[in-house]
Image (cartoon, coloured by chain):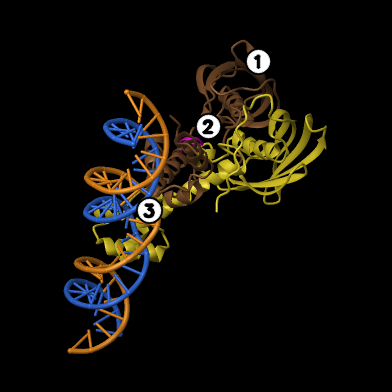
Chain colours: A brown, B yellow, C blue, D orange
Amino acid sequence: MSKKERQQHLLLIIEGNPFVTDRELTRQLKVSIQTIRLDRMELGIPELRERMKQMAEHSYDQVRSLPADEVIGDIVDLQLDKSGISIFEMREEHVFSRNGIARGHYVFAQANSLAVAVIDAEIALTASADIRFVRMVRLGEKCISKAYVRTLAGRKGKAEVDVFTYVGEEMVFQGHFIVYRSAIEEYSEGGERSADRH
Amino acid sequence: MSKKERQQHLLLIIEGNPFVTDRELTRQLKVSIQTIRLDRMELGIPELRERMKQMAEHSYDQVRSLPADEVIGDIVDLQLDKSGISIFEMREEHVFSRNGIARGHYVFAQANSLAVAVIDAEIALTASADIRFVRMVRLGEKCISKAYVRTLAGRKGKAEVDVFTYVGEEMVFQGHFIVYRSAIEEYSEGGERSADRH
DNA sequence: CTACATATTAGTACCTGGTTCTAAAATAAT
DNA sequence: ATTATTTTAGAACCAGGTACTAATATGTAG
């Protein structure tokens, strides 16, 4: 087995199991530990502990950053009780890693966030929705959601909002949302905070 | 500062930053490194490297069990093409800060993740859904989603999945999902691995 | 075949971030 | 004052390496 072949093999082994030590690699590749280490150097593969550290840090970052945003998408235009527009770009974290196709709930989340944001009420909650994922969204695509308020029933009733999401000219998602708008009174059991969101 | 207080403090520090070494802890808590280590023992906190290893393994397992970057909810039972159950607890990050009510898309995301996971196909994508948020979910509530596959059309067609989410006895969400299932051929460019870990 | 180059192996010293163990101080409780 | 608890100290050892030096094997061109 040539050096190149061995290094390719090494790469595959570590990719398949990043938790392998150099000592285990000597057994699998039948070369000395120094050779393993030279190979790692040449391939730029860090030692086991560094690999684990990077994985740990990566997952830690994701846990912190991903669910933190309350609103999915940047709202770029908003006319309360009328319409709104938001932009959201599908990034690595939002897609299936194996094929780069967006997870449905991110597409939904953008639309839902917008449908709720567009309603002028102290609290607005999605009551029900009828949605359709028209075509797949892929990694890197910019989704532009447009929401239109169709009907409003009083200051404390339901509102109907249609949301359409586009990538360029193409519609990728459409949804009909029924949103509850109301004051806080009914459900809260006291202990109100008044934390506004940025 | 008493021993108990110090240990509580230690716990908070490590929780806030799992990547802290004992040496750094001595600086923050103004006690010797031996005391730090005794405290860790008593609290059952493993050493830094072990903590990182566990985080790395955890994230790696998730990536492997479902090639998903962010599955919302822990899947606790799964019978492919039949049914599945997942649990998801609403935390601070998932609710409106001003009233502690869950954002709809997290409730949806749990159901959607489950609806997709329950389908046995190389790729499964949500095509459309009809959903209803039956009652609000509040901060701290544990949502239990149950998915039932209703119909399956061939190995490459649509599947219908019903998902019901409960908090205790109460149903909080119901959804009827139409999920596309298909083989991967079209989009993937091969590259299968089969590495087991211990 | 020889000479040089590349690849591989060997071995030692050293590093981090610990564990394990023994033992001496310091502090608190009875 | 005498135990008991808590804290600190120190040495030996470990995994899984890095960094460096040096010897040996293998190949390759002239």
Q: Residue tagged by mark 2?
A: A93
**Count of numbered labels shown in the rendering:** 3
Residue A114 at what x, y percent from top left?
A: 57, 23
| Residue placed most toward the observer, A177 or C16 | C16
- Give the magenta-colored segment's residue range: A64-68
Secondary structure found at label 2: helix
Please indicate whether residue B153 sits to the left or right of residue B146 in the image: right
User: What amino acid type should be assigned to the residue bearing mark 3?
Assistant: Leu
Q: In the rendered image, which quarter is residue B186 located in?
A: top right
Q: In the rendered image, which quarter is residue B194 located in?
A: top right
Secondary structure found at label 3: helix
| Residue placed most toward the observer, A121 or B22 | B22
Q: Residue tagged by mark 3?
A: B48
Residue B177 at what x, y percent from top left?
A: 74, 33
User: Gap between marks 2 and 3, in whole Å?
Assistant: 27 Å
Please indicate whether residue B99 sits to the left or right of residue D2 in the image: right
Looking at the image, tell me whether mark 1 or mark 2 is earlier in sequence order.
Answer: 2
User: What amino acid type should be assigned to the residue bearing mark 1?
Assistant: Met
Residue D1 at what x, y percent from top left?
A: 17, 89
What is the chain identity of the residue bearing mark 2? A
User: Gap between marks 1 and 2, in whole Å?
Assistant: 22 Å
Q: Is residue A17 visible?
A: yes
What is the chain identity of the residue bearing mark 3? B
Q: Is residue A71 visible?
A: no
What is the chain identity of the residue bearing mark 1? A
**Disc sitting over residue A2 in the figure:** none
User: What amino acid type should be assigned to the residue bearing mark 2?
Assistant: Glu
In the rendered image, the vertical position of residue A121 relative to residue B76, given as above or below: above
Q: Residue tagged by mark 1?
A: A171
